[in-house]
Image: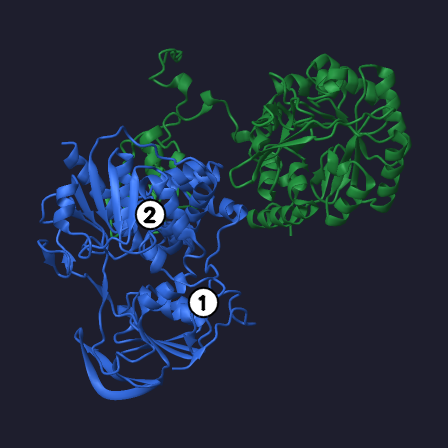
Amino acid sequence: MTLIATLADTEDGPSSPYADLTPAMTPVQALAESNRCLFCYDAPCIKACPTGIDIPAFIRSIATGNLKGAATTILSENIMGGTCGRVCPTETLCEQSCVRNRAEDRPVAIGRLQRHATDRLIDGEPAHPFPRAAATGKRVAVVGAGPAGLSCAHRLATLGHEVTVFEAKAKSGGLNEYGLAPYKMADDYAQREVAFILGVGGINVEHGRKLGADLSLDSLRADFDAVFLGVGLGSNNRLGIPGEERAGVEDATAFIERVRQAPPGNPPAVGRSVVVIGGGNTAVDAAIQAKRLGAEDVTLVYRRGRAQMGATAWEQELAQTEGVVLKTFAAPKEIGETTITFERTRLTDGKLSGTGETFILQADMVLKAVGQKLSADALDGLQVTGGKIAIDPSYRTTLAKVWAGGDCVATGEDLTVQSVQDGKLAALAIHSHLTA
Amino acid sequence: MADLSSTIAGIHSPNPFWLASAPPTDKAYNVVRAFKAGWGGVVWKTLGEDPPVVNVSSRYGAHLDTDRRMIGFNNIELISDRPLDVNLREIMEVKRDFPDRAMVVSLMATMTETAWAGLARRIAETGAADGLELNLGCPHGMCERGMGSAIGQVPEMVEQVTRWVKNAVNLPVIVKLTPNITNILWSAEAAKRGGADAISLINTVNSIVAVDLDAMAPTPVVDGKGSHGGYCGPAVKPIALNMVAEIARNHETRGMPVSGIGGITTWRDAAEFLALGATNVQVCTAAMTYGFKIVEDMIGGLSNWMDEKGYGTLDELSGRAVRNVVNWNDLNMNFSTKAVIDPALCIDCGRCHIVCEDTSHQAIRIDAGEGRRVFTVVNEECVGCNLCSHICPVPDCITMVPEQTDLPYVTWPNDARNPMRVPEAAE
């Protein structure tokens, strides 16, 4: 594998491999854009938001100069509104349903406005906007300090409960910290947001605590009044082809985590020719980030077509704009020393099959992004259905006193915004249970 | 192509767009730029007797929409603060260089014949003024010294000043009226009795345009304090239109040449003033918001619209809407119009529904459609109020369609539902 040094400041590249893809709005931009909002009645954008943020209300507040009110409106439904403003696929959610599309083909930039409002509050307001209710004396364990866990913990804390969060990794934030490409989630925002969320009080995070290692569901159920599992999807799917164990072959999530955790001045080296396998957002994230880190050729290969890709059309175009080559209808067969062999595929009546025709790509770095799955090791006693923890409509698992939400359950797409909603609704369900 | 040349009180200009007496017409530099940009005439900023007034620092306030569009504007500036002979010399120079443009000079003085007649003669002696405009309307500062609206609010004084100036000089005299009165007709009739050749209106509306919530003082803030000032711009146009129309349909003042002023920003605004009887228009705030270049679209837009409608001259257009301005008691009680929503243009914002539901007649129904809502007017509930059509963000999506009825034109005094109805004479 040939590793090349990162090109931090090439003439035709981005100024930094960590630069914000979509920078914060200036106040003037926010003023102009907020005035495009029509303040719809029962607005379609609200219905399209998994957390149900009152979007016209917060945008109106931006237009009137009530930024604190705008942020409070957002955060009251989505405590990670700052992250979601940055990383939500708004083109398939709120902005897709914006009525401005109909006559003008350009939605209000809801995501960017949301970031504009929340940034001011999170970076500028000393006091947490949501006070805690009187102490209930109830104690809740939350496993996982990712979006679902922190959302659940925050809502429980505001309702007066004491929360202990158990997190295996050294930092809180989950995929916000470890799994989002830096160009989407620049600088230390994930940690600033965590600090803001914990600022509500009543939440204690214990790091280095992992279910199945020094924690068991049984002991948590014995020690706490309720348990919430926001454990995400812990393991990556394998390609199952020869050469997968070679050096230079890595899970895309691990690559992004290495990039995210590297010191800003010293990002990890990338291959000269990088091949990313997969068609989802993680694949696109990894491909673009590799390109921004100086890879000469980045090819994203997906076994089905553009229409079947998990990545949105906007993300596919972004990848191409950033110089990533998209190849579709090709499945990996074997990884060699500096090459990877693909077989062309075809879809017949929705069924994928190989054509027998193969081609070879140069690859000194192969990033695998073919999906993640639940690590079911430490979930003894829980029913798992379709690779996800089974829950009822109020997020209750099949085990008494245990609720679950986020990517480890099947409530919607595996998105930050869905996890935040799961955590919030599970917290309300737990609260009802504890105060019944 | 329509002929836009204009004549009011014998004063000619190549088009009906004049700059009103205000900061844009304060000195030769600005006026030359205005004439080069195409303005048909100016009313030079009000001259007073020497020594010139002294202005304060911080002079303008604004009423802005949330997107910073100018809704209204106000000022606490006084009349020209430059020496009289400087202004007169510049007026002569500009008129010499732009002989085809209207050069009207505004003046203001205390309530004595000597003052008004003396000032009017000084201006007339330049030979450069095509006419005079008497400033009887300034609602701030000058009125505290017995001038401006202090005179304009008393019809007898309006008449007297007009007569003094008419007797002193042989120039067309335009009397500029203040809207800060109970009935504009009293001022207009007084000007006519005094011999005015034309009237212009409206001057600014007395106002506090905004409060600085940090300084806790009205804007513009002058060292922690503020004063009421003159309000103008788009927001005052409806007030001005009504006053122009009142004068046009009043028996005593009908036919008096009127120079329309008040929030004119587009050619369409100008056309509306002309339709209500104005002979020409004067503009200030729009120029102070966008610069002089806006006159190009005013001229072009008015000309194209007149061509489209078949108006060859301004005279053919002027006053065309006056006959349709009536009292409420002359409206047809049997007329009925209903809102119609075009689903092809609807963008699904729901605003028509919620404003009707919350604040009007509960006459717009929501049904589920293909991936969107369908809004339908409930004819039995719709009273034809127009609210939905006004707030709809899409032009022509909601239109008002008159109902076909065979009912006669019946006014309220004759309406059977009127308990005070005067019975018609025995048949």
Determine contact: label 1, label 2, CB under 8 Å.
no
Q: Using a 10 Å C-alpha cutoff, classify the residue at mark 2 as few (fewer than 14 neighbours), some (14 to 19) or many (20 or more).
A: many
Q: Which chain can be seen in blue?
A: A
N-term mark: 1 or 2? 2
Image quarter hosting the C terminus of chain A? top left
Shown colour of chain B: green
SS class, disc 1 = loop
Which residue is found at the position 52% from the left and 41% from the top? B67
Image height of B416 relative to B363, above or below: above
Q: Position of residue A171 (x, y in %)?
A: 34, 53
Label ID, residue A359: none
Q: In this figure, which residue is indicated by the disc labeled 2?
A: A45
Image height of A20 relative to B296, above or below: below
Q: In this figure, which residue is indicated by the disc labeled 1?
A: A267
Give the residue type at disc 2: Cys
Query: A234 or A34, which is in the foreground?
Result: A234
